[in-house]
Image (spheres, grey):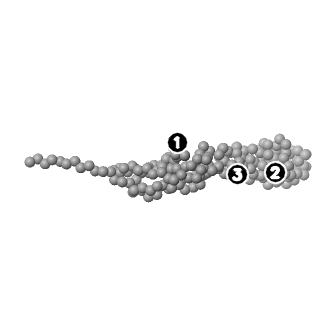
Amino acid sequence: MAKTSKEVTVGYGSIASNVPTISGTAKVGSKLTAKPGTWTAGTKLTYQWLTNGKTVSGATTSSFIPGAAQRGTVITVKVTGAKAGYTTVSKTSKATAKVATGTLTAPAPTVSGTAKVNKTLTAKPGTWTAGTKLSYQWYANGKTIAKATKTTLKLTAGHRGQKITVKVTGSKTGYTTAAKVSKATKAVAK
């Protein structure tokens, strides 16, 4: 008598997973990091960041830096775990607070050159957040010098005896505008 073979259906295993969390501050230019929690050993994790529930194109690593386009939105991250022989699982984090306006890196400028009539002073703005648009305004004894809005200032006889400062203002979409003033030069000599 011939034996008949029985087909056995094997179900997929279940991946142990956690709901991911997000660390960092929801702010333009500040890094957010996905914390996936503990998953079944050997599970391959992939990431997808979302803003107001919509996929952010190309945001598929474990960290994400919100840009100006994300200001005022909430951010979530979806973590998907895959492992051979197991059913693929996706979990989405709770939303962050609304993404706040960014803060520019804004160092105090310095002034180089000699404070002397007919000499030129140069504003050195320092290193601001990449992509920041800078503008300049020069002052003599704290009063605005008309039309002195370039990175350099040619000193004239009218500046003699006055201390010169420069204010650098930085602006960038999605960030709060920042302004910094240099220390004053010595009084302009003849």
Could one spot residue 59 in this view of the protein?
A: no
Mark 2 or 1 closer to N-term?
1
Distance from disc 1 to disc 3, alpha carbons, whole Å, reads: 30 Å
Which numbered mark, 2 or 1, is in the foreground of this view? 1
Residue 49 appears at what percent x and percent y?
A: 51, 47
Q: What residue type is labelled 2?
A: Thr
Residue 116 appears at what percent x and percent y?
A: 87, 49
Q: What residue type is labelled 3?
A: Ala
Mark 3 or 2 closer to N-term?
3
Residue with the most extreme left position: 1
Which dot marks residue 106? Answer: 3
- The residue that mark 1 highlights is 57
116 relative position to 180: left or right: right
Distance from disc 3 to disc 2, alpha carbons, whole Å, reads: 17 Å
Residue 99 appears at what percent x and percent y?
A: 60, 50
Mark 1 or 3 closer to N-term?
1
